[in-house]
Image (cartoon, rainbow, N blue to C red):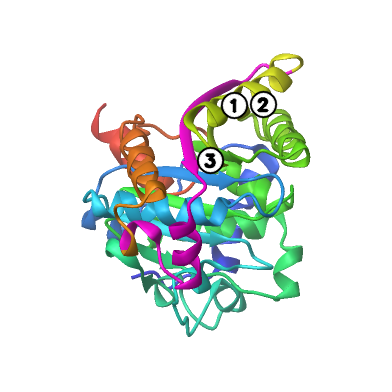
Amino acid sequence: MSTRTVEELSVDVSLVHHTGNCPVNFPVSPTLSLNRRPVQTIAVAGGKGGVGKSNVAVNLAAALGASEHEVLLVDGDFELGNIDRLLNLRPAYTLSDVFAGSCRLDDIVLQGPRGVSVIPSASGAMEMAHLTHVEHAGLIGLFSELPTSADTLIIDIATGLSESVMSFCRAVREVIVVVVDEPTALQDAFSTVRVLNECCHVRRFRVVANKTESSQHGLDLYAALSDMTDRCLDVLLDYCGSIPLDAQLKQAVSQQSAVVDVFPRSASALAFRKLATRVARWPQPQTPCGHIEFFVERLIEVADSTR
């Protein structure tokens, strides 16, 4: 069980801040014996608020959990976290307490729907808005010491392009961009793709169209975003489907539940299960990418075992 704090991990990763490379003597934690599988790591982004990215993150996690995946759902919005409220959870501690040193990361893990483990964030904690790159890297490093058998990590990142958004998108292997049919939402999605490509070197983005009126509506949104990126960016957009407008999804939000849990036959629940099936087919990471990332020690161990 991890006893190190964010500050102690930040010392370990200070070399990464200066060199951009993962130190070769990164300590291997004994908790890795719990499960040596690499972890699929996914950030869910939305550009602007109101596109439904938190609902996508919650229901994708629940749908994967229902299909026997072990999922760790992280609320990556340090200022206005809301995953706990979406799932009617009552955390005693949050990530702000981890940063304050009053508890460990494994102390704040909550049980969500379908066996999903949830790491809650703070809401209204202004001190969390000014974390440095090294402090973010320290938090990411703590996940390597978390005693979990998760095979998938989903992080619901904040809106905008804050340091936390940049740090988390560098530290995952897949970025989902949620788009809706609003001019400002498409423009903000494009801006998010552009900045993550230029600053974080993300080249592949998975696109999910939300609040759609038909399958074709979702394809049209994807085409509109593709037209914008094709004009000036060298990126790959992979269309992963659409989530329809659904009164039962809105009702599930009112009930503080995942729609795949309370209305499993609804149109949106079916769409989330379809999305989960697609996500489960994405290739698992097998080797470290050369910089700080979630669960890097598992990747180091897997890479060493294949030599």
Give yes or no for residue 246 being in the magenta stretch: yes
Q: In which quarter of the image is the C terminus?
A: top left
Residue in the picture at 38% in, 39% down: 275
Q: Name the foreground residue: 273 vs 80.
A: 273
Query: For residue 36: magenta?
Result: no
- Using residue 161 as the reference point, say whether residue 279 is left or right of it: left
**Which quadrant holds residue 231?**
top right
Q: Can you say whether 230 is above or below 247 in the image?
A: above
The x, y position of residue 38, in whole percent, is 32, 42
- Name the residue beneath numbered marker 1: 222
Residue 300 visible, this angle: no
Work out how far the residue at label 1 is from the one at label 2, CA to CA, in angstroms: 5 Å
Which residue does the numbered mark 2 point to in the structure image? 225
Type of amino acid at the residue the image marks with label 2: Leu
- Residue, x 70% and y 21% (percent of image)? 229
At label 2, counting other C-alpha atoms closer than 10 Å, the crowd grade (few under 14, some 14-19, many 20 or more) is some
Q: Is residue 115 above or below residue 155?
A: below
Q: Mark 3 points at which residue?
A: 22
Q: What's the amino acid at mark 3? A: Cys
Q: What residue type is labelled 1?
A: Tyr
Q: Where is residue 82 in the image (x, y as percent from the top left)?
A: 57, 68
Looking at the rendering, the stretch of residues picked out in magenta corresponds to 233-261
Residue 95: image quadrant is bottom right
Disc 2 and disc 3 in contact, CB within 8 angstroms: no
Mark 3 or mark 1, earlier in chain: 3
Q: Which residue is drawn at 41% across and 77% down?
A: 107
Q: Are marks 1 and 2 in contact (CB under 8 Å)?
A: yes
Residue 265, image x and y in percent?
A: 29, 52
Which of pointers 2 and 3 indicates the residue nearer the eye?
A: 2
From mark 2 to mark 3, how far is it between C-alphas?
34 Å
Would you call the spot at circle 3 few (<14 residues within 10 Å), some (14-19), or many (20 or more)?
some
SS at mark 2 in the image? helix
